[in-house]
Amino acid sequence: MPKSVAKRLEKLQRDFLWGGGKLERKVHLINWEVVCTQKEKGGLGIRKIDPLNKALLGKWIWRFAFEKDNLWKMMIWVKYGQEGFGWRTKDARGTFGVGVWKEIMKEANWCWDSIKFKVGKGTRVKFWTNRWCGNATLSQTFPQLFAVAVHKNATVNEVWDSSLGQGGWNLRFYRNFNDWELDLIRDLLNMLRDFRMSSEEDSVLWKGGGHGIFGVKDAYNLLVVPNACAFPIKCIWVDKVSIKIAFFAWEATWGKILTLDRLQKRGWQLPNRCFLCGCEEENVNHILLHCIVSWARVYTGEESSSLLGFLEWLAAT
């Protein structure tokens, strides 16, 4: 999806949200980035179009690597070719790659950053350059060892020597190591110590959540910038409170309701004095927490003598 289309769709969403259910241009009280964060982080949980589109496209990268000989996969395979033992297709370049798959392949890099291999037979996983042991490739974890490795493109199966008792690693390097380099060999062997080959086929695992299986929600969360803000969600989004009141409480918690101080910041030439008590400047904290007149009116107009009765009245307002 072109970014211009995503921006247009998000504009329609914003106008609908702040227009009270109509596509009208009204004041947007809270930044759209905040609106699109999770409710637990102070947003409304609305997903942004562009990263959602990327997550949906990334799912096809995952499916091509994860699924077996499906018809759609075989058709893509024939048209674009394969690389890396069939886990992925070749890059779609120029006029050769015109079409949907070319757009999908643009999401390959971030998607593969969250994929690791589960080694079975080890015939389709490269020992040094694929991510299968730890959170990075062994060539990244041990660059000094990789630089002097004899077979840099060897598979896990080719490095594994089944003739060594229960099996072991047959690592080959161009030269002997100096004393200060032996710790690297020890660390590498410690990482590989508990690994054993099996008769299962090699497969892929999704590191972004979902118990090793790709999920659009997990992928989306990887693509958006996390918000570390703590938000009192349980005090605002309450099941028995109407959405209209909860939405107002959400706006007020962010300090974004149109009190006089906020109107002044938007260029309105108004004297800032609370219309109720006439004693203090009007802002969200004053009008909702500290104004004695507003609280007096709440309790005077309602005969409830308990907090439960007050909340029931508030929910019905």
Image (cartoon, grey):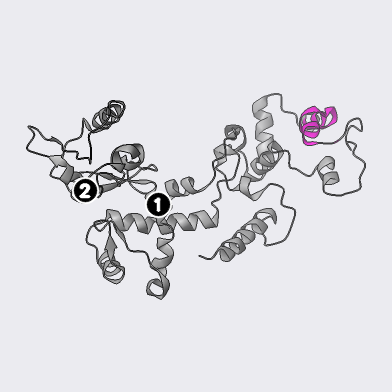
Residue at x-position 60% and y-position 43%: 43
Q: Secondary structure at mark 2?
A: loop
Residue 202 appears at what percent x and percent y? 21, 48
- Is 45 displayed left or right of 114 in the figure? right
Q: Amino acid at mark 2?
A: Ala
Where the C terminus falls, by quadrant? Answer: top right
Residue 111: assigned label: 1
Note whether 256 is above or below 65 in the view shown.
above
Residue 7 appears at what percent x and percent y? 60, 61
Please name the residue that numbered disc 2 is placed on: 154
Residue 147 appears at what percent x and percent y? 31, 42
Q: Secondary structure at mark 1?
A: helix
| Residues rendered magenta in the picture | 282-298
Residue at x-position 22% and y-position 40%: 173
What secondary structure predominates along the stretch shown in magenta?
Answer: helix
Contact between marks 2 and 1 (CB within 8 A): the answer is: no
| Depth check, front residue: 293 or 57 | 57
How far is the residue under mark 2 from the one under mark 1? Answer: 24 Å
